Image: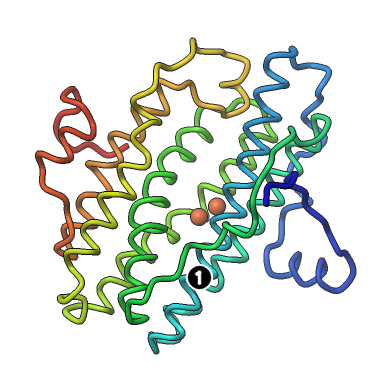
Amino acid sequence: MLAPFELDWCGGASAARLRRRRPGIDELPWESLHAETLDDATLAAARTTWTEGAFSEYASAAAFAALAGALLEAGAPIDLTAMAGDFVVDEITHVELNARLAATIGGAAPHLVDLDKLAPPRTDHPAIARAAALAIKICVVGESLSVPVLATAARVATQPLARAVLARIAHDEGPHARLGAHVLAWAGDRLDPFRDPLRDIARRALAAYAPLWRRRPPPPNPSTRALGILDGADHARVLRRAVRARVVPALAVAHLAPDPGWIDELLGDDVDAPRAA
Ligand SMILES: [Fe+2]
Ligand SMILES: [Fe+2]
C-alpha cells in the first residue's frame, strides 16, 4: 500500500551504538547550508533529489539485508556474509545523511512508497543461486553504476555540506560494488546450472537503468550542480561509461556478460572504447 515515506529516530542506546559504529556524521559541516541562499527551483530540486536519495538508500539497505539472508542460507563464508550485513548499516547511514540534507533545507519532498514491496522478491532457486542473483542486481550492476555517479557528484559539488556528504557516501560504495565479485567468485562453478537465468537477471538489471540515459536531459543548472546534483547529460554519460568500464568486465569474470551487440544496442552507438569513469 502506498504511504508517505517517513523516517523516525529512536535515540538513546540505539543512536549511541550507531554513532560508535559509524562515527563522524555529526561533525560534517551541517551549518554551512542555508535554504534562504537557494532560489526556488534549486530548493525544490534539492529537496526532491535528497528525498529520493534517502529512499533509494533505504531500498539498498533492504537489498543488502536480503543478500545477507541468502548468504546465511547458502552457508557462505562468515566474513562474506558479514560484509553484506555491515553494508546494511552503511546504507542506513546514507539514508540518514540524505534525510538530514533535506531537513537542512526545510524537510523532505512528498514521496509515496510501498514498503511491502521494498525487499527483492524471493525465488524458488537454491540459496546459492539466490545469493548470486542478488549480488548481480545489487552489487555488480546497481552499486557499480552508482560508484562513479557519486564520485563525480562529490567532485563537482562546491557547497561544503553537499560535497562532504557525497564524498562520505562515495567512499562507502566502492566495497559495496566489489562484494558482487566476491560472492560470484565464492559460488564459482556451482552456479553453472544457473548461468542462463543469471545472465538474464544481469540483462534485465542493466536494462532497468536505460531510461536514465535515453531520456532527454533538462538544461544544465549551475546552482543544483554546486549541490552535487548532476546535470542529466553528465549523469547519462557517467552511467554509460560505467556499464562498459565496470559492469561488463565484472560480469565477464563470472561468464555472465551479455552479448556485446546487446550492450551496444542498450547504450546506443556513440560510446566507444572502455574508459574509467
Ligand atoms: Fe548507499
Ligand atoms: Fe551502496
Name the spot of residue 224 as percent of width and height, x first: 61, 20
Image location of residue 265, percent across then percent down: 17, 32
**Coloring scheme used:** rainbow
- Among the 4 quarters of the image, the one containing residue 152: top left
* 104, 141: nearer the viewer: 141
Residue type for callout 1: Ala
Q: Secondary structure at mark 1?
A: helix
Please, which residue is most extreme toward the front here? 1
- The tally of labels here is 1
Task: Give the image quarter of residue 116.
Answer: bottom right
Q: Residue at x 66, y 57 (%)?
A: 93
Q: Estimate how packed mark 1 is, as few (under 14), some (14 to 19) or many (20 or more) residues with alpha carbons within 10 Å.
A: many
Rendered position, 51 above or below 34: below
Indicate whether 125 appears above or below 8: below
The one nearer the camera, 32 or 67, is 67
Residue 246 location (% of width, % of height): 27, 48
For residue 148, above or below residue 43? below
Quarter in which the C terminus is drawn: top left
The residue depicted at 81 percent of the width and 35 percent of the height is: 107
Residue at (18, 22) in percent of width and height: 270
Q: Is mark 1 within 8 Å of ligand 2?
A: no
Q: Is residue 125 left or right of residue 195?
A: right
Q: Identify the residue shown where x is 33% and y is 72%.
A: 183
> Which residue is situated farthest in the right direction here?
12
Q: Residue furthest bottom?
A: 75
Which residue is the site of mark 1?
66
In depth, the one of 27 and 189 nearer the eye is 189
